[in-house]
Image: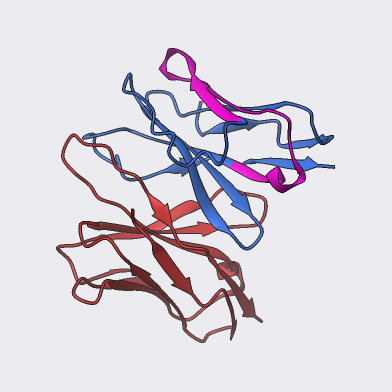
Chain colours: A blue, B red
């Protein structure tokens, strides 16, 4: 597609439920990032995928958070047993990938706003 | 790891005035410093960037300066317009050849341009 697509745009869930957030990066972009944007907290790095390399999961806040990227394209961020503090906007970004022109430039999606009641 | 601090967190200026946002970073190996603008309901978008071999870069009303010795960099917006109202993020990363690069963002500055 022309840009990074994220779904759902808004998700309201009850505490304790699992949620899945989807990211469809720009076609051909091998690098994919997930960030969390909480009020007053800026952009918090969660996880990074680059091609077939092992992902950098160093930003995942707890073992309730996981992410996968199938076929080097679409990525899903899963939050299990959601808590109220998980409420935030989850942003996905992609880039051309390591060593390629424009590798540093992140193109962000519009985000998925998660509200945990 | 890298730590990026950004200030102020909010900034209000009159239309036509200049706005300055400042950031500091901790990792002396960082050599790429982008600035992103986030409008309401949208994802951040790159507006300008600077590499460590350059001290200043300008694009129309926007300029960035970098002081590697002091490890700080700034965004300058001149002749501000209402459409400049948004949240601005600074960031820092390494750009190793063929290596992984992790982008660390500042907390963001909410800029309001008052007509």
Relative side of B5 to B115, left or right? left
Relative side of B74 to B79, left or right? left
What is the quadrant of the C terminus of chain B in the image? bottom right
Q: Position of residue A58 (x, y in %)?
A: 43, 39
Q: Position of residue B29 (x, y in %)?
A: 20, 57
- Residue A87, above or below A69: below
| Of residues B109 and A78, the one drawn nearer to the viewer in this rendering | A78
Q: Position of residue A72 (x, y in %)?
A: 41, 18
**At 51% across and 25% down in the image, what residue appears?**
A1
Q: Position of residue A49 (x, y in %)?
A: 40, 29
Exactly how many numbered labels are in the figure? Answer: 0
**At 60% across and 51% down in the image, what residue appears?**
A37
Seen from this angle, which residue lies furthest top? A71
| Of residues B113 and B106, the one drawn nearer to the viewer in this rendering | B106
Magenta region: A65-90
**At 41% across and 43% down in the image, what residue appears?**
A106
Tell me, yes or no, if residue A110 can be seen here: no
- Residue B90, above or below B19: above
- Residue B107, above or below B76: above
| Of residues A44 and A101, the one drawn nearer to the viewer in this rendering | A44
**For residue B27, what is the image quadrant?**
bottom left
| Of residues B112 and A22, the one drawn nearer to the viewer in this rendering | A22
Tell me, yes or no, if residue B45 can be seen here: yes
**At 36% across and 45% down in the image, what residue appears?**
A105
**For residue B92, what is the image quadrant?**
bottom left
- Residue B101, above or below B60: above
Residue A5 on the magenta segment: no
Residue A85 on the magenta segment: yes
């Amino acid at each position: 597609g022309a840009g990074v697509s994220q779904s759902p745009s808004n998700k309201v869930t009850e505490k304790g439920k699992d949620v899945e957030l989807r990211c469809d990066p720009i076609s051909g972009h091998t690098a994919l990032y997930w960030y969390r944007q909480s009020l007053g907290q800026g952009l918090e790095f969660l996880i990074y995928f680059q091609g077939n390399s092992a992902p950098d999961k160093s930003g995942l806040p707890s073992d309730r958070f996981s992410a996968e990227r199938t076929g080097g394209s679409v990525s899903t961020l899963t939050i299990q047993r959601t808590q109220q503090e998980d409420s935030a906007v989850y942003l996905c970004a992609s880039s051309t990938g390591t060593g390629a022109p424009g590798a540093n430039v992140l193109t962000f999606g519009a985000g998925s706003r998660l509200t945990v009641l | 790891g890298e730590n990026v601090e950004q200030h102020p967190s909010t900034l209000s200026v009159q239309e036509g005035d200049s706005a300055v946002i400042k950031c500091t970073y901790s990792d002396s190996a960082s050599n790429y410093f982008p600035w992103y603008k986030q409008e309401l309901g949208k994802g951040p978008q790159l507006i300008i960037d600077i590499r460590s071999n350059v001290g200043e870069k300008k694009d129309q009303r926007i300029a960035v300066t970098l002081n590697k010795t002091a490890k700080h960099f700034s965004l300058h917006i001149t002749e501000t317009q209402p459409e400049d109202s948004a949240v601005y993020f600074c960031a820092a990363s390494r750009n190793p050849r063929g290596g992984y690069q992790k982008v660390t963002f500042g907390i963001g500055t909410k800029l309001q341009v008052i007509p």
